[in-house]
Amino acid sequence: VFKSSILNYTRNPRRRFDFAVGVGVDEDLEAAQRIGLEELNSVPGVLSDPPPSCRIEELGDSNVLLRFFGWVDQHEADFFKVKSQSIRLVKIVLDDHGVDMPAPIYKVEIQRQAVHDKTEPAPPPRRDERPAIDVSVDRHLEDQVEEDIRASAEEDLLDRSVKPNDTRAA
């Protein structure tokens, strides 16, 4: 009994790849994402539909982890070569734009302050305008499965009345 989706890479030639890039904690994350995605969109073999994407995955001690995603048609391009070129080219463009990609380091600051110095730190700058954030559900994989089912002449043996979290399927 299978309790998760099975992906058959020979049936649907589109396959998603991903890779992580750690950028400095002081970097403009939206700019780093935009720069990386512009480059990823230009890599030969990376599909434009579904489009490449980038998510902020983790906040570490010395960096912020960005995860880039792209799709490859395995009938048209070698999956691993496209992924490798994507990593290489995104790194180069981030370097060219001066985006800091620090190695894991620990920064030790020793501050000597006189006992009588009572200056208060300046408040952080206000961010009155925030860009719209897209957190909609990613339906690209579901769309591909439905497209594959419609295009197939084979009988669909799945019971679509049972939802993935339905206990009746067990």
Image (spheres, rainbow, N blue to C red):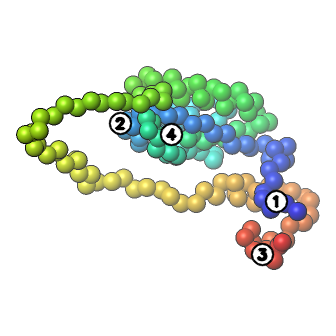
Q: Is residue 20 above or below residue 100?
A: below
Give residue 159's position: percent from left, percent from top.
85, 71
Q: Which mark is residue 65?
A: 4
- If you read the primary sequence from the N terminus, does the residue marked by circle 2 or circle 1 appear first? 2
Q: Quadrant of residue 147?
A: bottom right
Residue 129: x %, y % from top left: 28, 54
Nearest the camera: 3 or 12? 3
**Quadrant of image for the N terminus:** bottom right
**Gap between marks 1 and 3, in whole Å?**
25 Å
Where disc 2 sits, the SS reads loop
Instruction: Name which of mark 1 and mark 3 comes first in the sequence.
Output: 1
- Label 1: state its secondary structure: helix
First in sequence: mark 1 vs mark 4:
4
Q: Residue at x 35, y 36 (%)?
A: 26
Q: Residue at x 41, y 40 (%)?
A: 29
Which label number is shown at residue 26? 2
Which mark is first along the chain, 4 or 3? 4
Q: Mark 1 vs mark 3: give the one in front.
A: 3
Q: Residues within 10 Å of mark 1 (few under 14, many from 20)?
A: few
Residue plotted at (58% across, 60% down) = 137
Q: Earlier in the sequence, mark 2 or mark 3?
A: 2
Residue type at mark 2 is Asp
Residue at the image position 47 percent from the left and 41 percent from the top: 60
**Label 3 sits on residue:** 167
Q: Is residue 101 visible?
A: no
Taking 170 as reference, is 29 left or right?
A: left
Which mark is first along the chain, 4 or 2? 2
Q: Which residue is mark 1?
A: 149
CA gap, disc 2 to disc 1? 47 Å
